[in-house]
Amino acid sequence: MHRSKNTTNRVLASGLSSIIPISAGCHEVLPGVHLVNLPLPFTLGSINVYLVRLADGYLVIDCGMDTEACFQALGRAVETIGAGWRGVREIFLTHVHPDHMGLAPRLLDLTGARLSMHAQDAAYLGVLTQTKRYLNWANGVMREAGVPEEIIAGIATSSNEIHKHFHSLKPDRTLLGGETIAASVGELEVLWTPGHSPGHLCLYGRQRRVLFSGDQMLEQISPNIGWHPDHDPLGEFLDSLRKLERLEIDLILPSHGTPFSGHREWIRKTIAHHDGRCARILALLAGASRSAAELVNELWERSLTPFHYRFAVFEVLAHLEHLERQGKVACIPKDPIVRWRVT
Ligand SMILES: [Zn+2]
Ligand SMILES: [Zn+2]
């Protein structure tokens, strides 16, 4: 049941439209499901937060960043739908990136809502909020990856800026996947989809064949998969996509960009993208052993901002970890720079 995303406004089995154009503001995308598009101060441009009607009040899926622009736009949306802040009963975080969780402390104060998130992202947030320790660790990883000191210094400036937007949170309900939330649109199933973050969650409405995909599936963007110690984030991401592939989904409601359909085609293309990236890395290492930073310079033709350079290094490390677990590459630990070779 492959569907092309070019099938503009095609009416699907569930009676949904495949493409819903999104502009700033609040849009009712399904009865009782409002997409609120909030502005972001970086290249992603905006984030979609969802207000979902429950039997009693509303569920908010993600919060937006802790900027006044996000706060005001979300405040207008809760007024428009007639909920008000006190009508928000539950805050559900797909994951703990700052554009998704930044406003959570302020919203929890205003609403008195209960906070739900995955156990692994709750733990990960605990690590991220120890800013100095975390950034020292990340700098060490980049040094070993062969990133020059002047670039590490440049990255530190942008990382310090971003890390101001992580806040400590204590969930009222720690999720593992498999739980359900009763919404007016039907029961929503919590799906654990690790990879983009260790505790990333999607919500699946089986009845309406709708998926709140967080950053797991974005129409035009391949989600960033960064390395985490003791994890194979790329393997976890690919496994979670294979699970989503089996579901019947007519409408994907992503955290960034336009709602879309055609999840199987998207998954096929995304798996092919990562297969291609792994093959490229193997081909480069077949010529000579290289550091992760040298691979970044080969793989990205455009010059990267410090912010994106850090993502690129951690993304290459995630691919190397995946290939190492498959026995295809091995690292040559050497102080200070780790190099990689094919086996
Ligand atoms: Zn994210
Ligand atoms: Zn995001």
Image: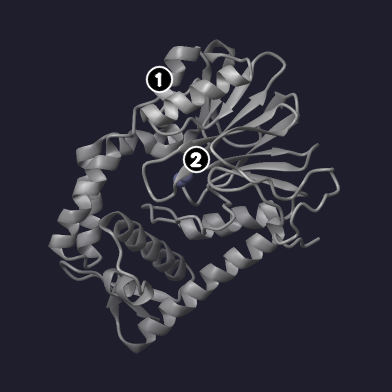
Q: Is residue 146 left or right of residue 210?
A: left
The three-letter code of the residue at mark 2 reads: Ile
Residue that numbered label 1 is attached to: 106
Residue 123 image label:
none
Are the residues at dot 1 and dot 2 in contact (C-beta closer than 8 Å)? no
Residue that numbered label 2 is attached to: 47
Q: Secondary structure at mark 1?
A: helix
Decide which of 53, 196 is in the foreground and name it.
53
Q: Quadrant of the C terminus?
A: bottom left
Instruction: Indicate if the residue with disc 1 has its beta carbon within 8 Å of ligand 2.
Output: no
Q: Which residue corresponds to the image point at 39% horizontal and 61% vertical from the top-left?
A: 315
What coloring was used for the rendering?
one colour
The three-letter code of the residue at mark 1 reads: Arg
**Earlier-in-chain disc, 1 versus 2:** 2
Q: Give the image quarter of residue 185.
A: top right
**Crowd rating for badge 2 (residues with CA inside 10 Å; few <14, some 14–19, many 20+):** many
Which residue, as the protein is rendered here, is positioned at the far bottom? 287
Q: Give the image quarter of residue 237.
A: bottom right
